[in-house]
Amino acid sequence: MSSYSTSPVTGTSSGSPVSPQFPESPKTLNLPGPQRIRDCSPSPMRHLMPSTLPTRRTRTFSATVRASEGPVYKGVCKSFSCSKGHGFITPEDGGADMFVHISDIEGEYVPVEGDEVTYKVCSIPPKHEKKQAVEVVITHLAPGTKHETWSGHIITS
């Protein structure tokens, strides 16, 4: 058997059941205390640590100066993904592929596989054992490929 509330103003029945928690004012909410609130659907990303890769924005001034004073290297773009925000460069003189972040690419084109590039090198903290490419400039577009500008226009080279 359900109980129905009557409007205090009109005295008529509203036809809706009255909750025992809200006998007079169904518009107020009785929320649980902060100790009882839980994240019922945790995000898979909540346990990940923030990235330690130094982007142009987060790189220290001294690291930027050291990189800009260093030699210029040549290489070929191995891969690059705008959606991921990074890619890799194969050095001209051999060796391990160099990581490149989207914030370190100069110029108007998004690099694609086969583009010839020049770059400088910056070490990656915290141990400074790994290196990444900075101040990356595309010197020659790969022939026969479609290139996209940062604004979204597509050209064929």
Image (spheres, rainbow, N blue to C red):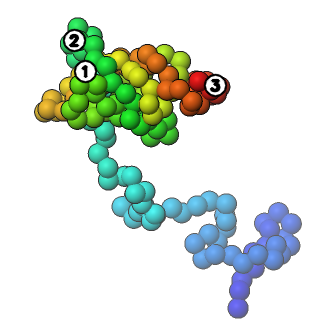
Q: Quadrant of residue 62?
A: top left
Q: Foreground: 59 or 149?
A: 149
Return the mark for residue 70: 2
- Label 2: state its secondary structure: loop
The kind of residue on which mark 1 rests is Val
With respect to residue 38, does 89 lie above or below? above
Residue at numbered disc 3: 155
> Are dots 2 and 1 in contact, CB under 8 Å?
yes
- Label 1: state its secondary structure: strand
The kind of residue on which mark 3 rests is Ile
Q: Is residue 36 visible?
A: yes
Residue farthest toward the bottom in the current orientation of the protein? 1
Residue at numbered disc 1: 121
Residue drawn at x 28%, y 17% as measured from the top left: 73
Q: Quadrant of residue 64?
A: top left
How many angstroms separate mark 2 from mark 1 (CA)? 7 Å
Q: Residues within 10 Å of mark 1 (few under 14, many from 20)?
A: many
Q: Position of residue 41 (x, y in %)?
A: 46, 63
Judged left or right of residue 108, residue 26 is right
The kind of residue on which mark 2 rests is Gly
Image label count: 3
Residue drawn at x 28%, y 25% as measured from the top left: 92
Lower position in the chain sequence, tag 2 or tag 1: 2
How many angstroms separate mark 3 from mark 1 (CA)? 29 Å
Q: Is residue 56 visible?
A: no
Q: Foreground: 35 or 3?
A: 35
Residue farthest toward the top in the current orientation of the protein? 69
